[in-house]
């Protein structure tokens, strides 16, 4: 018995050591797997912002669009000429990149990213987590081409930056150049094909979720839902020796109404016509093209972009659409005809430096009105017969912005200071011509914003 006990006491430490060694190996293998396939990233970011005027803005008033028009009381005081200040950390971000998985020559990856602004409304509410990006990737590398060239093809499926909004200016403000630059993250299926060293072809099918079209039912995704037609994007990129040129276009086809009240003939003899709700065949189809230029050399970067928006409010452009004709079932099938409102949106940035970085942003937006006469009476269009970007105002005619900024990068810490001057030319908003423009009593309204950012990245 004593002999058996000695054997057991000798074996137990050996078995324990073997188990510990196996556990350590499993832990080491799991750690290596995480390091090779998963990359955690993010930052803690605080904005401090002061404005001299009430403005259209979102995300705790940090996402800045434009100053509001005058609001005069009985004494002639402009109630919108009001200073304001805020500082918030709700745009802090957390994300995970997944890579390194493959089957043969097919590579797989993914990204999921979020921040914490959802649920915040004005100066009240509690910031909660919200989804920014979430997509999977499938790619094929070093595919053979003619003349010994190589091609890379990547497929992205999920929510990501809209291709027309992906090229952004070198600014640290939350709006990333909006409303001069398109802004949208949206569900999509996107294919990028890199052909050799210089050319990239891009094609996308896109849907609407957070950023939606305007219309008779408000800003909702139902217009594309009932159209059963995804957005279509196509673009081409050329790059060489520090230069990059990109051009593309976004095609949108929506149904502003899928049901409507229309006048129909009564099925009974000698009875008066009656109003019924029925399915209608409304549809609006538009194309928004753009061009982007970029040059980089050493510490200097120049960027410029111009976009011609046609009913581009779903990507943050200052446009929309309106009604050109209304029919009842006695004449047609009860549908309405539409025309898009157009806008020209352009920006440019010049930046220099690395540890100390200085940037100058200049932007310009022009409301061009509709491409055809809107429904009108004696040349005057009713405001209810056209719709506009919810973050703008129907009576705006043009917007100008100039913004210098300086950024100090110290390791993972960044400190930035920005001055932003934004001016809007408004009409009186009491009457609109047949192209949807307010041209009476044109006047300029401006805001001065001073903003600071403190950001720690990891």
Image (cartoon, rainbow, N blue to C red):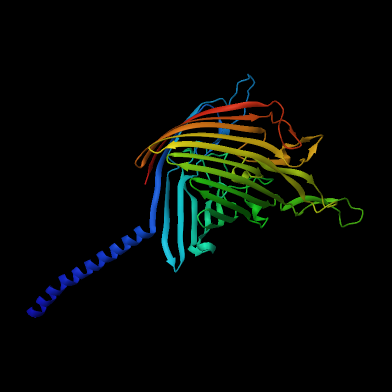
Identity of the residue furthest to the right in this view: 270
**Image point 73% across, 31% down: which residue?**
431
Identity of the residue furthest to the front in this view: 147
Q: Is residue 175 visible?
A: no
Instruction: Locate the N terminus and report the quarter of the image it occupies.
Output: bottom left
**Image point 92% across, 53% down: which residue?**
270
Identity of the residue furthest to the top in this view: 75
Q: Position of residue 73 (x, y in %)?
A: 63, 23
Q: Position of residue 311 (x, y in %)?
A: 66, 45
Q: Is residue 261 visible?
A: yes
**Image point 36% across, 59% down: which residue?**
36
Q: Nearer the viewer, residue 344 or 116?
A: 344
Q: Is residue 339 above or below residue 24?
A: above
Position of residue 38 in the picture relative to residue 83 (left or right): left
Tell how many labels: 0
Q: Nearer the viewer, residue 189 or 9?
A: 189
Q: Position of residue 113 (x, y in %)?
A: 45, 51
Q: Is residue 173 above or below residue 265?
A: above
Position of residue 401 in the picture relative to residue 260 (left or right): left
């Amino acid at each position: 018995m004593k002999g058996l006990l000695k054997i057991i006491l000798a074996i137990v430490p050996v078995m324990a050591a073997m188990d510990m060694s196996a556990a350590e190996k499993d832990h080491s293998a799991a750690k290596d797997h995480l390091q090779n396939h998963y990359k955690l990233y993010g930052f803690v970011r605080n904005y401090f912002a002061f404005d001299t005027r009430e403005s259209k803005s979102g995300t705790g008033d940090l996402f800045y669009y434009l100053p509001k028009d005058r609001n005069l009381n009985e004494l002639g005081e402009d109630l919108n000429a009001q200073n304001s200040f805020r500082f918030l950390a709700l745009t802090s971000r957390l994300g995970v990149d997944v890579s390194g998985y493959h089957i043969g020559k097919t590579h797989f990856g993914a990204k999921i990213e979020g921040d914490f602004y959802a649920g915040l409304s004005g100066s009240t509410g509690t910031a909660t987590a919200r989804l920014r990006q979430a997509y999977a990737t499938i790619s094929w590398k070093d595919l053979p081409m003619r003349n010994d060239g190589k091609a890379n093809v990547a497929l992205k499926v999920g929510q990501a930056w809209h291709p027309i909004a992906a090229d952004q200016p070198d600014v640290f403000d939350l709006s990333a150049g909006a409303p001069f630059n398109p802004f949208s993250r949206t569900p999509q299926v996107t294919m990028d094909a890199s052909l050799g060293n210089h050319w990239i072809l891009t094609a996308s099918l896109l849907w609407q979720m957070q950023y939606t079209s305007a219309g008779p039912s408000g800003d909702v995704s139902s217009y594309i839902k009932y159209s059963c037609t995804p957005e279509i994007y196509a673009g081409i990129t050329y790059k060489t020796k520090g230069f990059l040129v990109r051009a593309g276009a976004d095609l949108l086809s929506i149904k502003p109404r899928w049901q409507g009240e229309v006048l129909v003939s009564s099925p009974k003899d000698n009875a008066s016509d009656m109003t019924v709700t029925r399915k209608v065949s409304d549809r609006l189809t538009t194309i928004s093209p753009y061009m982007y230029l970029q040059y980089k050399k050493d510490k200097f970067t120049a960027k410029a972009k111009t976009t011609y928006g046609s009913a581009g409010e779903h990507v943050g452009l200052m446009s929309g659409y309106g009604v050109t004709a209304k029919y009842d079932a006695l004449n047609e099938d009860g549908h309405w005809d539409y025309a898009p409102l157009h806008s020209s949106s352009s920006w440019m940035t010049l930046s220099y430096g690395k540890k100390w970085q200085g940037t100058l942003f200049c932007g310009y937006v022009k409301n061009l009105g509709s491409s055809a006469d809107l429904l009108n009476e004696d040349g005057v269009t009713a405001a209810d017969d056209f719709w506009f970007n919810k973050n703008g105002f129907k009576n705006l005619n043009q917007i100008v912005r100039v913004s210098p900024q300086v950024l100090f990068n110290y390791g993972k810490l960044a400190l930035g200071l920005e001055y932003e001057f934004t001016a809007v030319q408004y009409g009186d908003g009491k009457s609109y011509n047949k192209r949807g423009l307010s041209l009476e009593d044109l006047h300029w309204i401006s805001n001065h914003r001073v903003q600071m950012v403190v950001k720690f990245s990891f």
